[in-house]
Amino acid sequence: VQLQASGGGSVQAGGSLRLSCVASGSTFSPMLMGWFRQAPGKEREFVGSISWNMGGTDYADSVKGRFTISKDNAKNTVYLQMNSLKPEDTAVYYCASRRFGRSAFEKWGQGTQVTVSS
């Protein structure tokens, strides 16, 4: 399975972007799909996740109420809708998948840059 993230770009504060993550390859049936981000000089941090089967979501406090994760199982695609963007949201965003029985996200996409200017 390969994950391909896209949709990044440059926006002004208050703007919106939607990231996509498409999974390709063999049968894709993860337990969770997640979004993470890494800003320059900082460690990678969790943004949010979605249950592939049930659709339940979880978000970091820093993005709650502004970001929404959704999925399209038929397209093997997960989305990250980012609204009310702030300069501190500037980072490379990665999608990742975690299989049942695994304690960590295993497959990672290549990352897509999001830059928010003030």
Image (cartoon, rainbow, N blue to C red):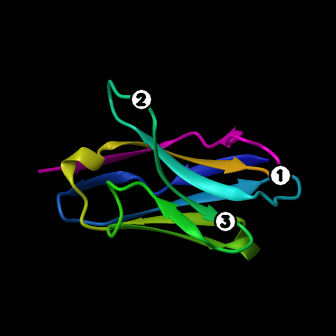
Question: Could you say whether the residue bearing mark 3 is in a helix, strand or loop?
Answer: strand
Q: Amino acid at mark 3?
A: Ser
Expressed as whole percent of the image width and height from the top left, the position of residue 10 reads 28, 52
| Quadrant of the rendered image containing residue 7 | bottom left
Residue named by callout 2: 43
Earlier residue among tags 2 and 1: 1
User: Is 18 left or right of 24, judged from the image as shown?
Assistant: left
Tag 2: Cα neighbours inside 10 Å, few (<14), some, or many (≥20)?
few
Q: Are marks 3 and 1 in contact (CB under 8 Å)?
A: no
Q: Amino acid at mark 2?
A: Glu
- Residue 25: mark: 1
Residue named by callout 3: 51
- Of tags 3 and 1, the one toward the viewer is 3
Q: State which region is magenta.
A: 101-118
Tag 3: Cα neighbours inside 10 Å, few (<14), some, or many (≥20)?
some
| Quadrant of the rendered image containing residue 108 | top right
* Residue 110 on the magenta segment: yes
Q: Amino acid at mark 1?
A: Gly
Question: How far is the residue under mark 3 from the one under mark 2?
Answer: 24 Å
At 83% across and 52% down in the image, what residue appears? 25
Tag 1: Cα neighbours inside 10 Å, few (<14), some, or many (≥20)?
few
Earlier residue among tags 3 and 1: 1
- Of tags 2 and 1, the one toward the viewer is 2
